[in-house]
């Protein structure tokens, strides 16, 4: 196999793996909820505000408009240095 094909296959495998962690089945979505303000920089599942596209684009830890899927009922019990997670986007100090 040529090195270009090997590299292409490696990239495809990495992208497939990354996307599989983002895509949520309907069964999983029923037991999960969006929790805003709990993800670390670059580890959000989606919605990270202006200038970002989606997953893994949050700019700071615990960004208030970036969410992460968590188990149903766990969001508001999740503590951060700024307080608990929220089921809606929250404003954080800059």
Image (tube, rainbow, N blue to C red):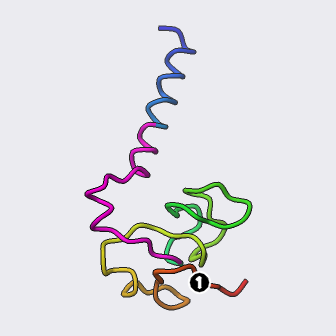
Q: Which residue is the site of mark 1?
A: 90
Q: Is residue 36 left or right of residue 57?
A: left
Residue 22 among those drawn in magenta:
yes
Q: Secondary structure at mark 1?
A: loop
Q: Is residue 16 left or right of residue 55?
A: left
The residue at the point 46 percent across, 45 percent down is 18
Q: Which residue lies most toward the bottom here?
A: 83
The residue at the point 31 percent across, 72 percent down is 71
Stretch in magenta: 16-36
Residue 77: where, in percent of width, then height? 36, 87
Q: Is residue 79 above or below residue 7?
A: below
Residue 32 among those drawn in magenta:
yes
Residue 85: where, in percent of width, then height? 46, 83
Residue 37: where, in percent of width, then height? 53, 78
Can you say which quadrant of the picture contains the C terminus? Answer: bottom right
Q: Is residue 27 left or right of residue 58?
A: left
Q: Is residue 9 above or below residue 18?
A: above
Q: Is residue 56 above or below residue 31?
A: above
Residue 70: where, in percent of width, then height? 36, 70
């Amino acid at each position: 196999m040529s090195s270009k094909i090997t590299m292409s296959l490696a990239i495809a495998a990495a992208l497939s793996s990354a996307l599989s962690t983002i895509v949520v089945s309907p069964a999983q979505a029923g037991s999960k909820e969006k929790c805003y303000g709990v993800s670390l920089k670059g580890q959000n599942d989606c919605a990270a505000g202006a200038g970002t596209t989606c997953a893994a684009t949050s700019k700071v830890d615990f960004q208030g408009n970036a969410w992460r899927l968590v188990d149903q009922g766990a969001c508001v019990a999740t503590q951060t240095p700024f307080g608990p997670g929220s089921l809606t986007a929250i404003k954080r100090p800059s």
